[in-house]
């Protein structure tokens, strides 16, 4: 395929309610929506960087600089035979997996649309619907218990609670008092250290399936030690930024569950490599989320159809997060099951008028 244009669009979409984690309280989404145009067909990708680097170190201004000045011009300078080869062409620019992923995803979508097949077919997906859980931001304890109850009633297959030191034991005790047996996990987004071992041992007593990223956002060694100290399994998120780092984390036994986010690991080809490695080692995976708009959410659904995604992920109903999404199709789960959007590519299209109303800036880079 010959790519003629890359469009970079910054959008700002309000959340229905603020999303509070141990690292930030966010009231709106800042997304980079990438559109590529090739032989009359468009393809869409989404960048999950934030304006400032609170989750990992990438941020929107840096990603825009690289997309505009490096990845997009390189992509248009030569034919693409297959989307799986694209990110390998950018290895001379180190790191920056989220920026690379935003553009690579658009290439996969465009290629699938040109072939007239759903993206999941190109990925060897085996499911036409995926099991989903939900990630709940931090709220007062009574609100949290109500939120858990509502999500359980809606059929979500697991509930994940955001925690931080001081926002853990009482909250978990209150949730477990009402829901002793539900599939429950916690996500600390790097808020603990090994000095807090007694707190971590208390968290260990709540029958959680796993604890997600308790320690430093780039660490493996301390997580490997922590894993020897707790009964509860560890799942890494922030630390896993490439197939090589997933391999290192598994070799070190720093985690036994893998959260895959396509942006964090550098695109769908990286996801495929991680997938095959985890399947070969019998390591359960699930698809994480970054509160994506309908574009990124649709990509997440397609990738989670691959056979190794055996645990319910975070790709919940869009309506939990947004009053109105930028896609014409609303991505909604029923009874903890998210259908895969039908049609070629990722199966969703942009709602042009609404997209326009939430756009901050647009730039088009041409061959
Ligand atoms: O750590 O999984 C995370 C959202 C933004 C940044 C990091 C995380 C999250 C979530 C929300 O937990 C998942 C979602 O609903 O998309
Ligand atoms: Mg996480």
Image: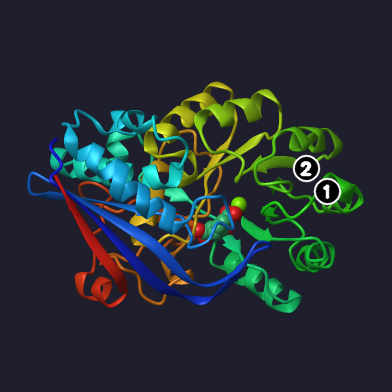
Residue at 45% x, 42% y is 96
Is the C-beta separation of discs 2 and 1 under 8 Å? Answer: yes
Q: Quadrant of the C terminus?
A: top left
- Estimate the x, y position of residue 334 in percent, counting from the top left: 44, 62
Query: In the depicted view, which residue is nearer to us: 241 or 177?
Result: 241
Q: Is residue 129 visible?
A: no
Label 2, residues with CA under 10 Å away: few <14, some 14-19, many ≥20: some
Q: Return the mark for residue 268.
A: none
> Real-space Cα distance between discs 2 and 1?
6 Å
Residue at 29% x, 62% y is 9
- Estimate the x, y position of residue 53 in percent, counting from the top left: 55, 56
The way the protein has been coloured in the rendering is: rainbow
**Does residue 212 appear left or right of residue 65 in this picture?**
right
The part of the image, by quadrant, that contains residue 82 is top left
**Does residue 245 appear left or right of residue 276 in this picture?**
right
Secondary structure beneath dot 1 equals loop
Quadrant of ligand 1 in image: bottom right
Query: In the depicted view, which residue is nearer to us: 20 or 50?
Result: 50
Q: Is residue 57 visible?
A: yes
Residue at 39% x, 30% y is 91
- Residue tagged 1: 204
- Estimate the x, y position of residue 232 in percent, counting from the top left: 78, 42
The part of the image, by quadrant, that contains residue 175 is bottom right
**Does residue 250 appear left or right of residue 116 in this picture?**
right
**Does residue 169 appear left or right of residue 260 in this picture?**
right
Q: Return the mark for residue 232.
A: 2
- Estimate the x, y position of residue 99 in percent, counting from the top left: 40, 47
Secondary structure beneath dot 2 equals loop
Of label 2 and label 1, which has the lower sequence position? 1
């Amino acid at each position: 395929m010959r790519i003629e244009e890359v469009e970079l669009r910054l959008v700002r979409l309000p959340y229905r309610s603020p999303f509070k984690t141990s690292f930030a309280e966010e009231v709106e989404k800042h997304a980079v929506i990438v559109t590529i145009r090739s032989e009359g067909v468009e393809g869409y990708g989404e960048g999950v960087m934030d304006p400032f680097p609170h989750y990992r170190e990438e941020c929107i201004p840096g990603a825009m600089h690289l997309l505009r000045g490096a990845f997009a011009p390189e992509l248009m300078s030569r034919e693409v035979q297959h989307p799986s080869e694209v990110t390998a062409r950018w290895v001379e620019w180190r790191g920056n997996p989220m920026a690379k992923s935003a553009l690579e995803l658009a290439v996969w979508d465009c290629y699938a649309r040109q072939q007239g097949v759903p993206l999941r077919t190109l990925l060897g997906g085996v499911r036409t619907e995926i099991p989903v859980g939900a990630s709940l931001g931090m709220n007062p304890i009574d609100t949290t218990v109500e939120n858990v109850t509502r999500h359980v009633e809606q059929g979500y297959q697991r509930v994940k609670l955001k925690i931080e030191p001081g926002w853990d034991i009482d909250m978990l005790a209150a949730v477990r008092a009402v829901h002793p047996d539900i599939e429950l996990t916690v996500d600390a987004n790097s808020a603990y250290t090994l000095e807090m071992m007694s707190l971590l041992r208390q968290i260990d007593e709540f029958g959680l399936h796993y604890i997600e990223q308790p320690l430093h956002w780039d660490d493996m060694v301390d997580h490997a030690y922590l894993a020897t100290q707790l009964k509860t399994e560890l799942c890494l998120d922030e630390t896993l930024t490439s197939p090589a780092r997933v391999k290192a984390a598994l070799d070190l036994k720093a985690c036994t569950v893998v959260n895959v986010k396509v942006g964090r690991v550098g695109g769908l080809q990286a996801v495929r490599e991680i997938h095959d490695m985890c399947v070969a080692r019998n390591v359960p995976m699930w698809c994480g989320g970054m509160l994506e708009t309908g574009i990124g959410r649709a990509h997440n659904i397609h990738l989670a159809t691959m056979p190794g995604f055996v645990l319910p992920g975070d790709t919940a109903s869009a309506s939990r997060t947004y009053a109105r999404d930028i896609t014409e199709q609303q991505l909604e789960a029923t009874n903890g099951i998210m259908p895969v959007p039908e049609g070629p590519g990722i199966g969703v299209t942009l709602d042009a008028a609404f997209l326009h109303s939430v756009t901050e800036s647009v730039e088009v880079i041409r061959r």
